[in-house]
Amino acid sequence: MNHERKVGTVSRGIRCPIIREGDNIPEIVTACVLEASAEEGFALHDRDVISVTESIVARSQGNYASVDAIAADVKAKTGGDTVGVIFPILSRNRFAICLRGIAKGCRKVVLMLSYPSDEVGNALVSLDALDEAGVNPYSDVLTLERYRELFGVVRHEFTGMDYVQYYGDLIRESGAEVEIIFANRPKTILDYTDAVICCDIHTRFRTKRILKEAGARVVLGLDDILDAPVNGSGYNERYGLLGSNKATEHTVKLFPHPCKELVLDIQARILKATGKHVEVMIYGDGAFKDPKGKIWELADPVVSPTFTDGLIGTPNELKLKYLADNDFANLKGEALRDAISASIRAKDADLKGKMVSEGTTPRQLTDLIGSLCDLTSGSGDKGTPIVLVQGYFDNYTSE
């Protein structure tokens, strides 16, 4: 009888020292994984995935920027008069410090908030409240006064924040005038100003296109601010301020610079130490949605900015439930196991569109594994910014 392994995919959070600027990430990550392997008594295998959170990579790169650097870039690129700031997410960690810098770089901010929620699902008002008020979010533009008249003070379900008040106060504290409106059509902002910063993340390309076609004088995304250093600041050549996090009340930690050589270095070090060919990725937010608060986790521009080539693509899996209930409905026990195992071994290289793969998850491998890693490492004090995923590429036939 064949030996049948009883464990499939395993995800392990790996602890490591607190990372500072200049630290050698490949050396530290390799050492921590090998020490965990020895201490916990598990071996590494080919196609294990070592995932490293973007925050420690950016920290080792010293990729930080101040409010003043953001302000200088905004002023240089917009002219610094009245600037439309549209579709930001509602987040003290993700956007508040960026907004502080933007406001410091211009005379007036026209803040245009999408409603009933921001791009990642943080609600300003419920759909039921919109229905009751007879408001059409696709066409209606609300002033701050009208919003308050209809809905009053609405506090975020999880943070207790009134983000409308918070963002308005923050802009004024930074020295700019503020006007707040609520609208979902990008072109609405052009009734107020022709210089616009689009703060949406995943819809930014469409938003920028619409505004440019409508004749806006200046159209920037957050990815166009600090895409190069300002007075020696940190920057991100591809994503600018996208993917940044609050570091202090006056600085942000930016998304890490491209670092393909870093993941290849870790891969090579593990191969040299163990003889095993692992995959390596840098990950940030996972891509999943909270069913209660309706918040979509992904506030980074991508789940994984850098990864080894073995993580390119999507899963190519059969749906075991479909095989068991349809093709082999008359089998059971060892005969059923053998029939399904034979189907897996003989499966097509590309099952896209085939009924036997229906119901499997059609997402990029890095999005799936990155989401698993984000859930494993958490966002607080677990202290495991390295995650080792084993058995992810195994299937029912793996021994």
Image (cartoon, rainbow, N blue to C red):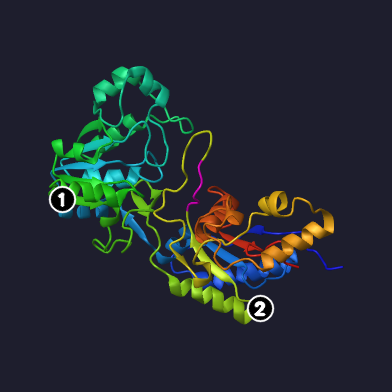
User: In terms of secondary structure, what is the magenta stretch mainly?
Assistant: loop
Residue that badge 1 annotates: 218
Residue in the picture at 64% in, 54% down? 319
Residue 192 makes an appearance in the image: no
Residue 95 makes an appearance in the image: yes
Residue 287 included in the magenta stretch of the image = yes
Mark toward the viewer: 1 or 2: 1
Residue in the picture at 80% in, 64% down? 4
Label 2 packing within 10 angstroms: few (<14), some (14-19), many (20+): some
Q: Which mark is residue 274?
A: 2
Q: Position of residue 152 (x, y in %)?
A: 34, 20
294 and 35: which is toward the camera: 294
Residue in the picture at 38% in, 53% down? 244
Q: Position of residue 342 (x, y in %)?
A: 72, 66
133 and 274: which is toward the camera: 133
Image quarter hosting the C terminus: bottom right
In space, the residues marked 1 and 2 are separated at their CA atoms by 54 Å
Q: Residue furthest right?
A: 1
317 and 37: which is toward the camera: 317
Mark 1, secondary structure of its residue: strand
Image quarter hosting the N terminus: bottom right
Query: In this picture, which residue range is highlighted in magenta?
Result: 285-289
Q: Which mark is residue 61?
A: none
Label 1 with label 2: CB-CB less than 8 Å? no
